[in-house]
Amino acid sequence: MTYHGTAFCGTCKSADNVVGTHNVCLGEDYDLDDKTGLGRSFDGIGGLSGGGATSRLLVNYAEPYRSQILDYLFRIWSLIKILKVEIGGDAQTTDGTEPSHMHYEDDENYFRGYEWWLMREAKKRNPNITLIGLPWAFPGWVGNGENWPYSFPEITASYVVSWILGAKQYHDLDIDYVGASISELQVWHSKFDFKTNKTVLFQNLRPVKVIEGSFSIELDVDEVYTFTTVRNGHRGNYPDPPTSAPFPKSYKDDFDVSGNPYFSEAPNFADQTGVFEYFTNLTDPGPHNSTLRQVVTQRPVTWVADADQTISVIGDYKWHDLMVSCDIYMEAVHTGGVFIAVRVDKGGGVIRSTRGIFFWVYADGTYKVTNDLRGMTVLAEGLSGTRARVWYTLTLTVKGNYASADLNGYPLWKNAVLWEPRHGWVAIGTSSFELAQFDNFAIEALA
């Protein structure tokens, strides 16, 4: 088969209006011939949900706006024909961490995170959409002691296959390709006229016949053609979304979810190292029955420099004066450590170097205030009397150049002097990859 087209490469003129020596191919015809064999067929335009956070906040959108966004992405008339999702590996993979379906070798849960939900929503709108899964990183146990997932291929293969089987068993999702024999294509035409500003977008033209697998069309300058097998396609149309609003200055979450929550992660938190999940605390049937728990206990296999501590951020990056409180519970005896923080200035692949004001308490009965996540710049330290397996309430207040904090309502330290950073997110986390719980989280942003 032969494809015919017209190339428009433009002309080059010198200052005295003489055509230069550059090759001119304006209106020149060209042919593409498959006599030597066929190349890969075009599978369609794909969308990617991965890198730790590209779709993290979509699940928190209010209806009907969330469904409208999903319609734009995946309805049968959408251009997106392929959805590629991250197979979560409990590790930082550019913008955050996504939970694995197997935190540990003897652990399996196929409802963690939001990728299962996103694939179901895509299939609901377009049953023929292609689904692809790819691990960006792996839980530490997959490396079997190494920071490399392919030294023990049988472990890695079993891990990935379990995700594929889980997708089918628990969500009726086939992770595979689909195709069809094509005899006619619907045509959508766009023309970007930058000189007269008379741009035409997605104009529906007559269908083009596909004869023995080929068709011919002539292209003009600044034109885009979209070819699709969808016969009833049309442009999406919804009312304008509400005006963007800042993160609420007063925010609370008691992590109290009954039964099996729809999502495993609390809304609006963005894990940067470690995984923070809803947890039912069977040892405390009282006020801390439902909590948020950091669950990764081994450094993951990853290509990004995850922090040595776990951390999840939330809030408005512009905040500078605020008060944060949270109930915390250290599970690691003697070695446990937990923090709350404000003015956290970095995330993603540079999370190791993030700064802020970090208020730490430890299971050995001490506390520390640092200007960085690594704990290298100490602003204050002393005895706290804290120990593991006891609930404590931490409160951190920052105003201008001064910070102070309470432990169970009593001042532990005050007026620690700080200069940088001047603003940033709020965060919670642990001093290592360890189990710890959080409850009754609250923010009051003053400015």
Image: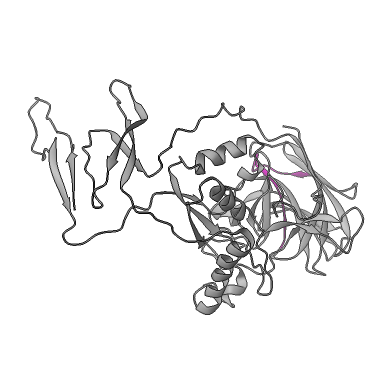
**Residue sitting nearer the eye, 308 or 139:** 139
Residue 380 appears in the rendering = yes
Asked whether, in this view, residue 204 is left or right of residue 72, the answer is: left
Residue 286 located left or right of residue 426: right
> In the figure, 118 relative to 329: above or below?
above
Vertical order, 193 against 308 (above or below) = above
Spot occupied by residue 244 in the image (x, y as percentages of width and height): 61, 30
In the picture, residue 137 is in which quadrant? bottom right
Give percent across and percent down for residue 23: 10, 40
Q: Nearer the viewer, residue 401 or 2?
A: 2
Q: Nearer the viewer, residue 207 or 219?
A: 207
Residue 341 is a magenta residue: no
Quadrant hosting residue 57: top right
- Residue in view at x 23 percent, y 37 percent: 219
- Which quadrant: the C terminus? top right
Q: Residue at x 72, y 49 (%)?
A: 266
Q: What colour scheme has been applied to the protein in the rendered image?
A: one colour
Tell me if residue 402 comes above or below residue 203 in the rendering: below
Measuring 77% from the left and 61% from the top, which residue is drawn there? 436
Indicate left or right for 196 with 25 as reference. right
Q: Position of residue 72 (x, y in %)?
A: 51, 38
Please tell me which residue lies in front, 89 or 211.
Answer: 211
Q: Position of residue 178 (x, y in %)?
A: 43, 57
Instruction: Give the extent of the magenta segment.
Output: 414-431
For the question of whether residue 398 can be seen, the reply is: no
Q: How many marks?
A: 0
